[in-house]
């Protein structure tokens, strides 16, 4: 398992085993349903799991972690990122993983079930169809930040945390993005893959 967990020294044996299991599970599912680029499946842990855990680094450093009972919606979860790794990291937090593509949602739920995550639900839907209210929304490279903020404001109490890459100046300029905080992922993970990537948080 090529995963840097030095930022998370208090993981249990159960959590470590769950992270370990993701490699075979996603490789197997990806051979049947293409949820991750076939060229990228060998980089599953670095490009997908590690990248997702940057949200946990931000939450832990800025918020002292998520309290038990916190509710989080993963908007456009694809095959389960960042939601599944975050659900492993925070077993006392409730996650709803939402995506418009049914086959990807099925994979996310199957992986969550296979590693024993009881804090994950999935839904084949757009976020505008979801009627619940959550403490936080998370997302990874789904759409431009202003558009995403318009969708999640009505169903989220405390803000949006998303993973972004590249130059964000144009995305951050609309008024709806006022108060947004950008943290470089390279402060937590040293691999060059993260040099241009950030955690972006807009509080509500």
Image (cartoon, grey):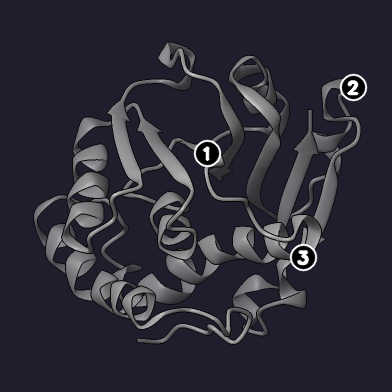
Pick whichever, 171 or 125, lies toward us. 125
Compute the Cα span from label 2 to label 3.
26 Å
Residue 145 coordinates in the image, percent (x, y):
70, 33
Residue extending farthest to the front is 68
Mark 2 or mark 3: name the one nearer the start of the chain: 3
Pair 2/3: label in front:
3
Which is nearer the eye, 53 or 39? 53
Q: Secondary structure at mark 3?
A: helix
How many C-alpha atoms fall within 10 Å of the one at disc 2: few (<14), some, or many (≥20)?
few
Residue drawn at point x = 89 percent, y = 22 percent: 175
What residue would you read off at disc 3? 61
Dots 2, 3 in contact, CB < 8 A: no
* Residue at 12% over, 66% down: 28
Looking at the image, tell me whether mark 1 or mark 2 is earlier in sequence order: 1
Q: Which quadrant does the N terminus fall into?
A: bottom left
| Residue that label 2 marks | 175
Say left or right for 160 vs 169.
left
Task: Tell me if mark 1 has few (under 14), some (14-19) or many (20+) residues whose alpha carbon lies within 10 angstroms of its own.
Answer: many
Q: Which residue is mark 1?
A: 72
| Secondary structure found at label 2 | helix
Secondary structure, mark 1, is: strand
The residue sitting at 86% across, 24% down in the picture is: 174
* Circle 3 crowding by C-alpha within 10 Å: few under 14, some 14–19, many from 20: few
In the image, residue 45 lies at what x, y percent?
Answer: 41, 74
């Amino acid at each position: 398992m090529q995963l840097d967990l030095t930022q998370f020294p208090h993981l249990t044996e159960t959590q470590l085993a769950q992270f370990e299991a993701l490699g075979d599970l996603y490789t197997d599912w990806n051979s049947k349903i293409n949820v991750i680029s076939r060229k990228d499946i060998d980089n599953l842990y670095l490009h997908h799991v590690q990248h997702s855990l940057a949200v946990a680094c931000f939450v832990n450093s800025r918020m002292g972690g998520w309290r038990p009972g916190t509710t989080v919606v993963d908007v456009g979860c694809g095959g389960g990122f960042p939601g599944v790794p975050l659900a492993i990291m925070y077993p006392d937090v409730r996650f709803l993983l939402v995506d418009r593509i049914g086959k990807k949602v099925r994979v996310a739920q199957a992986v969550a079930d296979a590693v024993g995550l009881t804090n994950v639900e999935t839904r084949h839907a757009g976020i505008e169809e979801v009627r619940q209210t959550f403490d936080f929304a998370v997302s990874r490279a789904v759409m431009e930040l202003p558009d995403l903020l318009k969708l999640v404001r009505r169903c989220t109490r405390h803000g949006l945390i998303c993973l972004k890459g590249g130059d964000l100046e144009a995305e951050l300029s609309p008024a709806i993005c006022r108060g947004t905080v950008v943290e470089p992922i390279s402060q937590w993970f040293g691999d060059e893959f993260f040099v241009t990537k950030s955690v972006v948080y807009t509080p509500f």
